[in-house]
Amino acid sequence: MDGFGSINNLLDQNGQQHGTGQGAAPALSVASDEKEFELQKKIIQIEQKEKEIETKAFAEQIGIPHIDLDKFPVTQESLRQIPLKQAKELGAVCFYKSQDQARIGALDPQTDAVQKFVKAFEQRTHTRTVVYVVSQKSFDRIVEMYNRLPIIEGIIKDIKINAESLSKVKGDVNDFQSLKKLLSQANTTDLVVYILGAGLKLDASDIHVEAEQNKIVIRFRLDGILHDAADLPKEVFHQLISRVKLVAGLKINITNKPQDGRFTINLPDGDVDVRVSTMPTVFGESIVMRLLHQNRKGLTLESIGLRGYAFDKLMHQIQRPNGMIITTGPTGSGKTTTLYAIMQIINKPGVKIITLEDPVEYKMEGVNQSQVDHEKGYDFATGLKSILRQDPDIAMVGEIRDLETAQIAIQTALTGHLLLSTIHTNSAAGAIPRFLSMGVKQFLLAPALNAIIGQRLVRRICEKCKKEVQLKPEEQKHVDKIIASMPEKENTKVENKPKQFFIGNGCDACNGLGYKGRVGIYEIMIINNEIKHMILAGQVSEYDMEAFAVKHGMLTMVQDGILKVLDGITSLSEVFRVIE
């Protein structure tokens, strides 16, 4: 029975039940009204079902998937991707949005307006977007959900960091003392604006909001070091946490489980992506907001501290068409930044680069970036298999942490691709025994490796308050020993220049810390034929391999650090802090 037959049958049944002759029940009786309402409801349901079937047939005809959004859960973040006015003009709504994927439902995806919008949407959001055909009923349901957005949008508007509000914070915040004063006078609505604005003004990489027994502690990570910035009364804790959760798309009522979210601050000089992580603690939730500046123009190997022998050798390896370039070091040592600097060099027309990251930290134009999702089974190994089917020239994998990923990465390098990745070890030489401990075969690892970079980040001395100091006798003796162990070419350069040492005295420009910014110190181990033979022969002692590389001209991280100390870039205590 078709839909119209069903409707006619319902009408016939209703006529029999109500009666049409003498003695029929009063038309306005309660029972009659209820039956009439139920009848109309069933008619509407049948009509909607028929229209959904017609929509599905239309989708099959044009070869685009169909979806019924009748009970589909749609988040506020998804709705905010397309303004209501534009959604009505296009006949399209966004019903799903994650960090790297989006789903758009359209009444007619074939229109030029929808197709142009989807293309621009992908470029703007850097997401893989899939378009579905939806019925008028599904579309109307999602449009109706916009009516619940104004309340949310009003709250978000309060804490949005725009150019005007940031300008106010920049004018009021110069150091931690001025931040404390500002926060003590701010109402609850302005707290998040001031905290984020101050973090941007002071160039913080992370903002920590930590609940203690009697107060809230605001801490900023500046140049890798965590500093207590301000305290807040415990009474504002719930309002502050709720506002951060709301703008990050997190569930406000969940306080006993970790959550991860994000939002973007739009500024004239480039967007700032804010990654938010919450975790339950004894005295309440702890929140960490990581500030990622998306404007990566100007990022070069020279600007991050690579120069001389290390720079020349690495540039040669970057030009090779295949093999592996691996960066090593602990968390927060700048490994991913180094890989981005390399990709800036090789990102040219005619070269296809695909990355697999966890998470995507910085968006790069011209690079296909994909983010792993462990909950959906999309990990590094699975993603790397997919990358190879995309025919890239260069692949970047955020981290190699297991045998399966390592094996696929090596096969990628051996089959004509240049592969960039990271691994957690203490030195460049330590990467080789780390690979072998995973179970990688020696005869595959040796020909796959091109170069291994060991690195750390040290703070730069503030140029505004730099002053020369004299070393203690034991410090001078230690420095002389390191200089004597340098390759002859570098040793000669050092001997012929004055040995001056500097520290930062602390000033307003560096917030009294004596340091402003960071720079890398590096060691680059080139995998030449001799080292390949050592790997194949099973001679994989980290110390022996490092000694061999040094003998053939490699500068170690501590030696590179001393050269930067002598150039007045950093201090001796900074180098020893991260290396020894």
Image (spheres, rainbow, N blue to C red):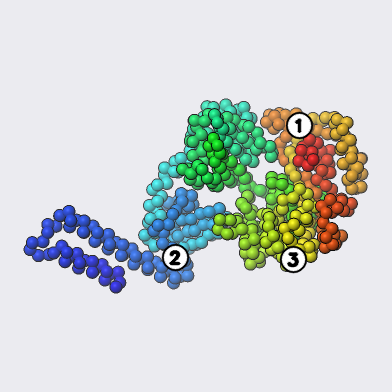
For the residues labelled 2 and 3, the Cα–Cα distance comes to 42 Å
Q: Earlier in the sequence, mark 1 or mark 2?
A: 2
- Asked whether, in this view, residue 211 is left or right of residue 324, the answer is left
Is any atom of residue 269 visible in this view? Answer: no
Vertical placement of residue 29 versus 577, above or below: below
Q: Earlier in the sequence, mark 1 or mark 3?
A: 3
Q: Quadrant of the C terminus?
A: top right
Vertical placement of residue 61 versus 493, above or below: below
Amino acid type at image mark 2: His
| Residue 493 rendering spot, x and y as whole percentages | 90, 43
For the residues labelled 1 and 3, the Cα–Cα distance comes to 48 Å
Local SS, label 1: strand
Local SS, label 3: helix
Q: Which mark is residue 414?
A: 3
Q: Residues within 10 Å of mark 3 (few under 14, many from 20)?
A: some
- Asked whether, in this view, residue 155 is left or right of residue 23, the answer is right
| Residue 37 rendering spot, x and y as whole percentages | 23, 57
Residue position for label 1: 504
Amino acid type at image mark 3: Leu
